[in-house]
Amino acid sequence: MNRILVIGSGGSGKSTLSQKLSNILDLPVIHLDTYFWNPNWVSKPNEEWDKIVEQFTNEDHWIIDGNYSRTMDIRIKKADLIIFLDMPRLLCIYRIIKRRIMYHNKTRPDLNAECKEKLDWEFIKWVWNYRKRSRMNTLKKLEQIKEHQQVIILKTRKQVNEFIIRQYKLNQ
């Protein structure tokens, strides 16, 4: 496993899992949010963003976390392992509120330094609607590639913790 893609709703735990796996597997983490957002939450233009994603996925070793459905096929194609964090909606909402409180007036470690943590109704709605808007498309993509690539779908915090423990034991 040299290229791991971690996807899921906002608040599903992508960045946390990616960092834990990085510590266990000694692979570099690429938090897509860090590179997608310019200062003050201004997004990169599509062409520039595509080049950035292509450049990252051409590396030999990585853990990439983030959704960005427009470029997901590029990342899926290059990944050895795809982990989909299919967490309950209420857990994701709880986590985005919790991190807003934790990082009030600060920048999260997985974001551009000039993007202070924020929480607005648009993002809350995006997380709330993830299951009906994006989940099925993601599951369809994963179904199509599961014969050729390793796909793991984790639906609970317990499953995530068990997965981390297995990885730790494998790499001792």
Image (spheres, rainbow, N blue to C red):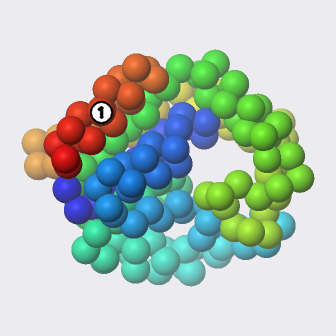
In the figure, residue 123 lies in which quadrant?
top right
Residue 98 in which image quadrant: top right
Could you say where residue 42 lies in the image, as x and y percent from the top left? Answer: 77, 68
87 and 17: which is toward the camera: 17
> Mark 1 sits on what residue?
165
Which residue of the protein is positioned furthest toward the right in this rendering? 105
In terms of depth relative to the viewer, which is nearer, 79 or 126? 79
Q: Position of residue 145 (x, y in %)?
A: 19, 46
Identify whether 62 is placed above or below 12: below
Residue found at the far front of this picture: 172
Please indicate whether residue 88 sits to the left or right of residue 124 in the image: left
Locate residue 17 relative to residue 3 in the image: left or right: right
Q: Is residue 132 above or below residue 51?
A: above
Total numbered circles? 1
Residue positioned 80% across, 51% down in the render: 117
Report whether 165 appears left or right of 125: left
Q: Is residue 10 left or right of residue 103?
A: left
Image x and y of residue 49, in percent: 55, 74
Relative height, residue 42 to residue 143 (above, below)? below
Residue at 70% x, 35% y: name it: 96
- The quarter of the picture where residue 41 lies is bottom right
Within 10 angstroms of label 1, few (less than 14), some, or many (20 or more) residues? few
Whether residue 78 is visible, yes or no, is yes
Please say if 157 is above or below 169.
above
Q: Looking at the figure, which quarter contains the N terminus? A: bottom left
Residue at point 23%, 62% (across, down): 2
Looking at the rendered structure, the secondary structure element under dot 1 is helix
User: Is residue 75 in sight in this rendering?
Assistant: no
Residue visible at 79% across and 69% down in the picture: 114
Residue type, label 1: Ile
- Residue 21 picture location, percent across and down: 37, 49
